[in-house]
């Protein structure tokens, strides 16, 4: 490979640290009402005031510190048309890289100071408009901590070279290596496993799917007992990180397959996961987490802001063997396994 993706690792990590510092500082000095103010409605999502803090840094950084030597297509929500060619004016065919970024994944939890958000970046060689998640060669994700939280984790991976991670103490500046280890448990029993159902729309159907899958895997709960648990972390990067650390054993986000249900209800398909939310799934895969689409295949969503994406993550092969057949059977019974193609209104 002529272009060396390793040269982008340090600059991207530096960018993440600048965004982390700027966003935490903004959260410290601004009121909740200020940070949660809606500044723009886009097709993919709502842009809040807190998002603007990171977006300004993002464009300036790539324009001044990367594109001056290496042409690239930058893909991110908040950019006009969802992407920009840097240096400006060059044709996309001259870009070496396609870089997809979510400057704040988990905005809602962060702006209400409920839970950490994440900065996500994936880098792929430019293969034109059909460049997809499987083409990503470098991924970096960095935690944006709550104001009251002094520790922040970062993980990164180059395809085929494993994963490195560190924990940063923002009070002392100390950095310590972090060993990430997905769960080795053979079952979701007594562990965290969930289907994402963050927002109204088809939440009842997603809950019914969740119940059906868990009951088929574990049977009915004995009186006064709980067989497994869930954690509705409203951040795809956060969900992936929970799988990487062994906190979660199974996570699936099937909102993009709810199109047929929403058509029956006379409603549009609501907010779904997008490729920028999943641009660091390479890190999870390099650790051994199994990340697939709802049919069990690799994620191949093109690197753009519009596509709706459904995905499933399994901590290991045993968890996948336990859950994936049940997941697919439950979707098939409802006629939803092809719902992504039939019901997605974008991409």
Image (spheres, rainbow, N blue to C red):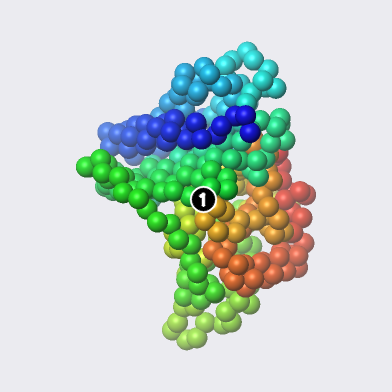
Q: Which quarter of the figure is the N terminus placed in?
A: top right
Element under disc 1? loop
Q: Answer above or below: position of 299 versus 182.
A: above
Count of numbered circles in the view: 1
In the picture, residue 260 is in which quadrant?
Answer: bottom right
195, 11: nearer the viewer: 11
112, 174: nearer the viewer: 174
Q: Is residue 3 visible?
A: yes
The residue depicted at 42 percent of the width and 43 percent of the height is 142
143, 209: nearer the viewer: 143
Q: Answer above or below: position of 176 versus 86.
A: below
> How busy is the neighbourhood of tag 1: few (under 14 within 10 Å), some, or many (20 plus)?
some
Q: Is residue 117 visible?
A: no
Quick one: which residue is furthest to the top in this view? 89
The residue depicted at 74 percent of the width and 54 percent of the height is 339
In the picture, residue 89 is in which quadrant?
Answer: top right
**Pointer 1: what residue?**
162
In the picture, residue 170 is in which quadrant?
Answer: top left
Percent coordinates x, y for residue 342 in the rendering: 77, 49
């Amino acid at each position: 490979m002529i272009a060396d993706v390793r040269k982008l690792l340090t600059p991207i990590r530096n960018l993440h640290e600048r965004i982390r510092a700027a966003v935490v500082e903004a959260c410290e000095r601004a009121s909740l009402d200020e940070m949660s103010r809606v500044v723009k409605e886009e097709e993919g999502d709502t842009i809040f005031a807190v998002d603007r803090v990171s977006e300004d840094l993002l464009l300036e950084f790539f324009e001044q510190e990367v594109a001056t030597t290496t042409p690239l297509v930058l893909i991110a929500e908040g950019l006009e048309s969802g992407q920009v060619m840097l240096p400006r004016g060059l044709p996309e065919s001259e870009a070496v890289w396609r870089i997809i970024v979510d400057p704040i994944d988990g905005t809602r939890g962060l702006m209400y100071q409920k839970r950490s958000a994440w900065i996500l970046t994936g880098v792929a060689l430019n293969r034109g408009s059909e460049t997809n998640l499987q083409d990503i060669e470098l991924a970096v994700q960095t935690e944006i901590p709550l104001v009251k939280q002094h520790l922040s984790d970062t993980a990164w991976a180059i395809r085929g070279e494993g994963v490195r991670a560190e924990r940063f103490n923002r009070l002392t500046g100390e950095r310590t290596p972090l060993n990430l280890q997905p769960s080795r448990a053979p079952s979701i029993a007594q562990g965290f496993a969930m289907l994402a159902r963050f927002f109204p729309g088809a939440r009842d159907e997603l809950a019914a799917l969740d119940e059906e899958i868990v009951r088929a895997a574990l049977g009915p709960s004995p009186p006064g007992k709980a067989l497994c648990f869930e954690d509705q972390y409203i951040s795809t990067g956060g969900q992936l990180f929970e799988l990487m650390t062994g906190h979660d054993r199974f996570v699936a986000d099937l909102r993009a397959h709810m199109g047929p249900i929403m058509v029956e209800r006379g409603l549009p398909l609501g907010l779904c996961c997008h490729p920028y939310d999943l641009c660091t799934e390479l890190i999870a895969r390099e650790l051994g987490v199994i990340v697939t689409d709802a049919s069990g295949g690799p994620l191949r969503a093109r690197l753009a802001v519009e596509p709706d994406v459904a995905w499933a993550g399994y901590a290991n092969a045993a968890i996948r063997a336990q859950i994936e057949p049940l997941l697919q059977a439950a979707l098939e019974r409802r006629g939803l396994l092809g719902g992504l193609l039939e019901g997605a209104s974008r991409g």
